[in-house]
Amino acid sequence: MDDNQSPDVSTFGPGLALVRRRRRFFFATVAIYVPAMWIIHSISPTYRTMGTAIGIWVIILIVTMFWSAVAVCPRCGNFFHVNGMTLLYLRKCLHCQLHVNADKKP
Ligand SMILES: [Zn+2]
């Protein structure tokens, strides 16, 4: 462990950790779609069950997407993933280019 971090970047730690956590929820929701549908299909492959499962998944996706979209950049105070009407999951802030792992770099 070295303490070469510039002081301003290290203060972003908690804010960036929050952004990362919300990104993980969103990506996990996307990633779980195929295995979840495969498991549900193997248990009950009816149209109604699949339709209900997809509906629930879409609701969870919208919630996690919204939750991650309102994560605020700790440096510039704008939404990390939103610029105007654009929602982009880049690894940098869309406003000030702060990297999502800036607090982890030496
Ligand atoms: Zn920013």
Image (spheres, grey):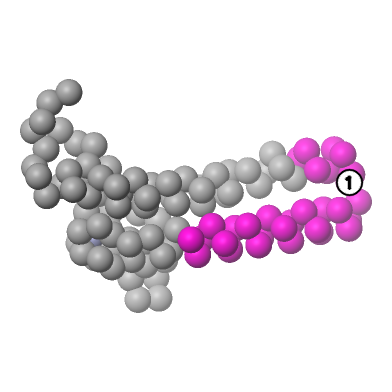
**Quadrant of the snapshot with the N terminus:** top left
Task: Locate residue 70: give its quadrant.
Answer: bottom left
Which quadrant is home to the C terminus?
top left
| Rendering coords of residue 66 (x, y %) | 50, 64
Q: Quadrant of residue 58?
A: bottom right
For mark 1, does the 10 Å Cα neighbourhood hold few (<14), some (14 to 19), or many (20 or more) residues? few
Rendered view: 37 above or below 65: above
State the residue at coordinates (85%, 38%). Answer: 42
**Viewer-closest of 88 and 1:** 1
Point 39% across, 70% down: residue: 86
Q: Give the x, y percent position of residue 72.
A: 33, 62
Q: Does the magenta-highlighted stretch encompass residue 52?
A: yes
Looking at the rendered structure, the kind of residue marked 1 is Pro
Q: Position of residue 69 (x, y in %)?
A: 43, 63
Q: Is residue 24 magenta?
A: no
Report x, y in % for residue 101: 27, 43
Q: Main secondary structure of the magenta part?
A: helix
Q: SS class of the residue under badge 1?
A: loop
The residue labelled by disc 1 is 45
Q: Tell me the residue at 37%/67% (across/down).
A: 82
96 relative to 35 in the view: left or right: left
Q: Which residues are magenta?
A: 38-67
